[in-house]
Image (spheres, rainbow, N blue to C red):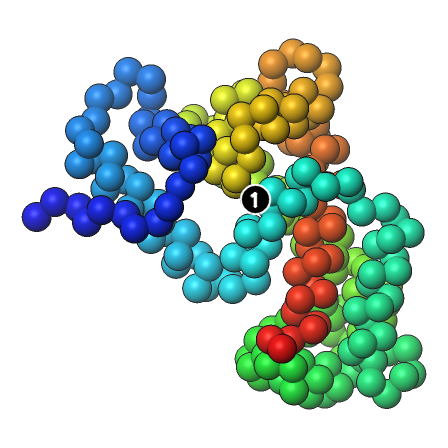
Amino acid sequence: MGAAASTKGYTKDQLVALVSSAYASDTETLTISQVSQKLNDKERAAAKASAADPDAGEVESDWKAAVLDEPLSRDDRAVALRAIFDSLDEEGDHSISRREYITTMVARGATWEEASASFKAMDDMGSGRLTVAKFDHYIMKETVELVRTSFKEMDLADGDRERQLSKADVRRFLLQHGLTKDQAMACWTEIDANKNGKVNFREWRHWAEEKLTGLVVAAEQDKAAGAS
């Protein structure tokens, strides 16, 4: 029995990028059925990743806005983080205990397991309390991880991990995240600052970290606000 047709909608640019990513090389030949199967496999893998880490799905959905919007300034980030922290500091003592955090998050719609795991990720020293400084450190750690995983995804897309990205790698990745061809090319111009046609991790991080900090902050704002 042939592969079931995908029911997910794609723009023309996204579909071109997806089909391109199905091929291991420019010379590989695939049937329509094989391409369809590879696209279905890609969707299933994405769904599985989202189910394993729901927050990752929320972050991915806002990639386009994060890339195209003005980067979050240091002052704006500090204000946003303080607002999130204060909304969780219901005792008003400028620190958040594990019990306080979990109780607040569960009341806002999270499960106990989700709240407990989130607190553990932020309290990496295991002190049992969160401060604004810890919260800021967590945001930056999550941002760097997002930068690292996105670089790795692009680097592995063509099946040859070179630890450098080509224009095609970056363009394909950005198209898959909803950018137009012109927007993707404008981003490439910014990323490839030395104009050598290749981007290493340091160059990608220099561009992406500033862009994606706001994305991670927004995800934490949504989490703190709860489902309502």
Residue 73, x across and y down, in percent: 86, 46
Give me the residue at 60% from left, 45% from top.
Answer: 63
Seen in the picture, residue 35 relative to 196 is either above or below; the reply is below
Seen in the picture, residue 71 relative to 191 is either above or below; the reply is below
Q: Which residue is mark 1?
A: 149
Residue 193, x across and y down, in percent: 73, 19
Structural crowding at the residue carrying mark 1, measured as other residues with C-alpha within 10 Å and reported as few (<14), some (14–19) or many (≥20) = few
- Hey, which quadrant is residue 59 in on the image? bottom right
Q: Secondary structure at mark 1?
A: helix
Residue 107, x across and y down, in percent: 65, 87
Seen in the picture, residue 142 relative to 71 is either above or below; the reply is below
Give me the residue at 74% from left, 33% from top.
Answer: 206
Give me the residue at 86% from left, 87% from top.
Answer: 91
Residue 183 shown left or right of residue 14 in the figure = right
Instruction: Say which of 7 and 126 sits in front.
Output: 7
- Hey, which quadrant is residue 15 in on the image? top left
- The count of marks equals 1
Give me the residue at 70% from left, 72% from top.
Answer: 224
Res. 118 in view = yes
Q: Residue furthest left?
A: 1
Residue 49, x across and y down, in percent: 44, 57
Res. 162 in view = no
Residue 147 shown left or right of residue 7 in the figure = right
